[in-house]
Image (spheres, helix red, strand yellow):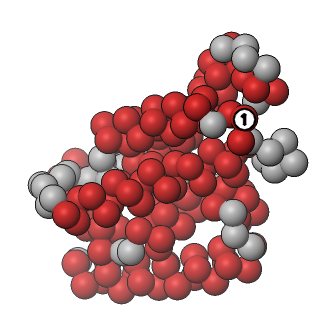
Amino acid sequence: MRALGAGESHGLTELVRRHQQPLVGYLTGIVHDAERARDLCQEAFLRVYRHSGAYRPSSRFTTWLYHIARNLARDELRARKRRPTLAFPEHGLDATPAEGRCVAKDVEQRELVLAALAQLSPRDRQLVVLRDLEGLSYEEIAERLGVRLGTVKSGLNRARSRFAASYAATS
């Protein structure tokens, strides 16, 4: 960020290289559309570039970046409510069947998980995706979302309960 703030374009290149893949995964978990998540990721980095002067070095870059991305994702979800479309959720769930299992069973299982995730609120879905699909620690989630650790723990507990209820209802 220091290089970018000094007007050196290689700073942005390095930030994109380091953070693009996890950011796309994070956004995909929220908007359920990998292509749209890539677009939102590009928009987030464009905003980082445009507003690099507003960045405060006293805070972590990832917190600022994920705050920008979260706001973009929220705007996307609000826009979808105004113009409903058919969307097929995409997640980083393993597409290959487990050893010795039937492909049809794995596809059915994945569809049940995605259906249950789709029933969650965006905030609950975000917590479950970050912890259970991306494997982030509670501390990393708190930092990324800019909330306290206790908020993550209690929110994730509630989100998992809602997910379990939703999953049980769909299976």
Q: Is residue 74 above or below residue 159?
A: above
Residue 27 falls left or right of residue 155: left
In percent of the image, x 15 and y 59: which residue is there?
A: 83
Q: Position of residue 84 (x, y in %)?
A: 14, 60
The N terminus sits in image quarter: top right
Using the rendered image of the protein, determine whether residue 146 is visible from the camera's viewpoint.
Answer: yes
Figure label count: 1
In percent of the image, x 52 and y 85: which residue is there?
A: 158
Q: In the image, what residue type sits under mark 1? A: Gly
Q: Where is residue 39 in the image (x, y as percent from the top left)?
A: 37, 35
Seen from the viewer's position, the closer of residues 90 and 43 is 43
Q: Mark 1 points at which residue?
A: 53
Seen from the viewer's position, the closer of residues 129 and 49 is 49
Quick one: SS at disc 1? helix
Crowding at dot 1, Cα within 10 Å, few <14 / some 14-19 / many 20+, comes out as some
The C terminus sits in image quarter: bottom left
Q: Position of residue 10 (x, y in %)?
A: 68, 13
In percent of the image, x 26 and y 53: which residue is there?
A: 89
Q: In this view, does 28 lie above or below 81?
A: above
Residue 150 falls left or right of residue 43: right
Q: Is residue 146 above or below residue 69?
A: below
In percent of the image, x 72 and y 14: which residue is there?
A: 8
